[in-house]
Image: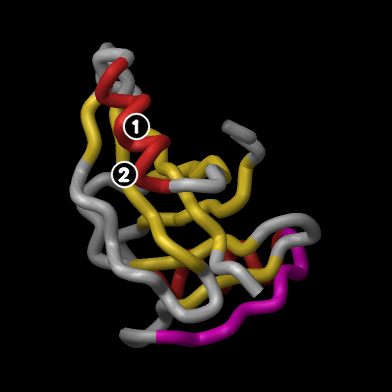
Amino acid sequence: MAGEVSYLEIGTKKAESTRHFFEQLFGWSFYPMGNKGEGWFQTPSVKAGLHGNDPKPQFFIFFSVPNLELAIARVKELGGETDEPGPDEPGFGRFCACRDPQGICFGLHQPREN
């Protein structure tokens, strides 16, 4: 597996406030999508999604894998846990939230093939 950071997700209580903060701090371009204030930033190296109404504000890191199903099986084989993988998201690919045996949260991301 590659394991390169391929995507970030920012969960926040108030998406519009967080959007403004990171636009001003880093100058990231923002692309609205979904609910008010939600969408994604284009950072210099990866996309960073932004969603609101998250009770536990956090950055969630996703690692690139060439085959999501094989990577999920490997996480489970090593004692970790996974959620059900999500559907193919246009322009992004497929995602799955995971936890290592101690509960550390991370995600797997199979980028969309061009």
* Front-lying residue, 56 or 47: 47
**Does the magenta run of residues contain 91?**
no
Return the residue at label 1.
Answer: 105
Q: Secondary structure at mark 1?
A: strand
The disc placed on residue 94 is none
Are there few (<14), some (14-19), or many (20+) residues within 10 Å of tag 2?
some
- Residue 48 % position (x, y): 57, 61
Sequence-earlier tag: 2 or 1: 2
Q: Amino acid at mark 2?
A: Ala
- Residue 93 % position (x, y): 48, 66
Q: Is 62 placed above or below 26 here?
A: above
Give left or right: position of 42 versus 19.
right
Give left or right: position of 30 versus 102.
right
Q: Quadrant of residue 75?
A: top left
Q: Amino acid at mark 1?
A: Cys
Q: Quadrant of residue 69?
A: top left
Label 2 with label 1: CB-CB less than 8 Å? yes
Q: Quadrant of residue 4?
A: top right
- Residue at 57% across / 32% down in the picture? 1
Read off the magenta span: 26-33
Give left or right: position of 57 versus 44.
left
**Does the magenta run of residues contain 31?**
yes
Return the residue at label 2.
Answer: 97
Please name which of the two marks, 2 or 1, marks the residue nearer to the observer.
Answer: 2
Q: Secondary structure at mark 2?
A: strand
- Residue at 36% across / 58% down in the picture? 12
* Front-lying residue, 74 or 15: 74
- What's the CA distance linking mark 2 and mark 1? 7 Å
* Front-lying residue, 68 or 54: 68
- Residue 84 % position (x, y): 19, 50
- Residue at 25% across / 14% down in the picture? 79
| Number of numbered labels in the structure image | 2
